[in-house]
Image: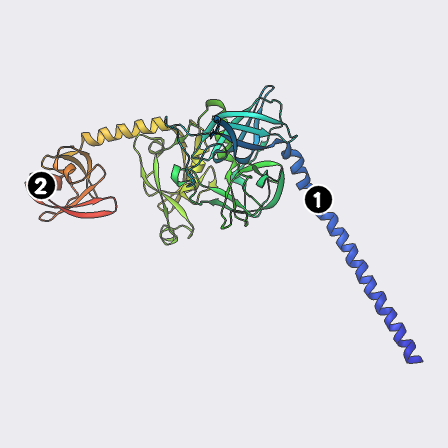
Amino acid sequence: MRVLALLVVAATVLAGGEAGARQRALAELRQLAAESQRLSRAFNLVHEIVGPSVVSIRTTERQVVLTWSGRAIREVEAGEGSGFVVASDRAQSWIMTNAHVVLQTDGRNGFVRRRDGSWAGYDRLRVVLHDNREVEADYAGVDVQSDLALIRIPVGELPVIEWGDSDQVHVGDWVVALGYPLGVGYSATAGIVSATDRSTGIYEAVGGFESFIQTDAAINPGNSGGPLVDLQGRIIGVNANIVSRTGSNIGLGFAIPSNLARRVAEDLRLHGEVRRGAIGVRLEEIDARLAAGLGLPPAQAVRIASVDPFTPAAEAGLQPGDVVLAINGVPVVSVQQFRSRIAARRIGERVTIGIWRERQQLTFGVRIADRAEIEAALAKAARELVARAIVLPVFGCRVVPDEQGLLIVQVDPDGLAAEGGLSPGDRILAERSLGALTTAQDAQRLAALREGIIQVQSGRRTMWLRFRG
């Protein structure tokens, strides 16, 4: 009996211990849940603040149908996407979305043109507001290089989004994607920033800008054009595309940075087109081995391959071989990122470019110029280059000597050079009897020959050509 009593006491103690542990676990769980509610509340507030600015965009095409009674016109749903209000006054509002939402595409990441060369839109645009009002919309402007568009609706005093600074976005930041995916209605999904400065090649066909923010927040067909926002309710990207083998979200979503989108939205609203600037440089990416040889960390880097004369870059003192470290203090690690950062700036604005030159870090202030100014500078440089070029009368071309050879700067359309398929930008590297050709004297010696065999570089090809004058 004593043994049995001891066993009963032990079981009671054990049960009491388990119950106590459960109570302590439950208390801790409740405490952690209460703390996590603060994060949940942040997501609630993002929806409350940004949601009313998010809209659904539906596109319609008119088709001619032949029937027994004659021809009939019917409207066919073409697609659905998302957008958000970027400006609003008493009478109307402007909505940003993706160009591929409101323009016809060719199925190969390109856009369809009309016979007059303009981009082909849809016959009808309809916008469904957050309160389910449906209104007709018209085009305010499109920019296919950034895959962004602005449409206008005759409804005023709508809530407007707050722009965030996409240059301050970091991997691991919480984000919320808002939009109207797959026709199921307004939805919000959450995730983190998975990467920045991503390029997918989707805009190569139009020479577009690719410096995407990558996120694992669920983005599906229909989310295109909707906002990607931070936990302060500020838009840091425009949801644009996904990478998927199934056509649905697998955690690889991409958004256009807000700094570029904001610049495009402002230009489209004010001018109906984007006035994009440049500074006059050509760039190349260098690998880790070359970067280390220059005294830089073994990370992806951007080097200036050439500087166009008479441009802001030349005026500021930038030189070929300079490695770009940062723009306005924000690191630059790819050519696409550099292009996107410059494209996000207004013409006439000045930017600070950090440079690595001869193992020293330097800073230059550079003005953003209009494309027309850059083209005028290039034309002026070309005229000066031709004026000081050496004439090769037998070949029917003009050349300028440099360290690599004799650069062809002008070709007579009726001369031997044109007949041999040469064009400005090609180089004459050598002549079989004269050897390498790199100086003005070499050019004069070549000009005196009536026949011979020359080595020519055209793009990446090198070939030997026989000539006889």
Q: CA distance from mark 1 to mark 2?
A: 81 Å
Q: Which residue is mark 1?
A: 38
Give percent across and percent down for residue 356: 39, 44
Binning the other alpha carbons within 10 Å of mark 1 as few (below 14), some (14 to 19) or many (20 upward) gives: few
Q: Is residue 42 left or right of residue 338?
A: right
- Split into 4 quadrants, where in the image is the C terminus? top left
Sequence order check, earlier mark of 1 and 2: 1
Q: Residue at x 51, y 47 (%)?
A: 247
Q: Residue furthest top?
A: 91
Look at label 1 and name its amino acid: Arg
Give percent across and percent down for residue 26: 78, 56
Instruction: Tell me the SS state at disc 2.
Output: helix
Give percent across and percent down for residue 201: 42, 44
Give percent across and percent down for residue 106: 42, 38
Q: Which residue is at the front of the view, 468 or 444? A: 468
Residue 106 circle label: none
Binning the other alpha carbons within 10 Å of mark 2 as few (below 14), some (14 to 19) or many (20 upward) gives: few
- Split into 4 quadrants, where in the image is the N terminus? bottom right
Instruction: Tell me the SS state at disc 1.
Output: helix
Residue 445 circle label: 2
**Nearer the camera: disc 1 or disc 2:** 1
Q: Do the residues under discs 1 and 2 have CB atoms within 8 angstroms?
A: no
Q: Is residue 148 left or right of residue 47?
A: left
Look at label 2 and name its amino acid: Arg
Q: Which residue is at the front of the view, 113 or 254? A: 113
Q: Is residue 163 left or right of residue 35?
A: left
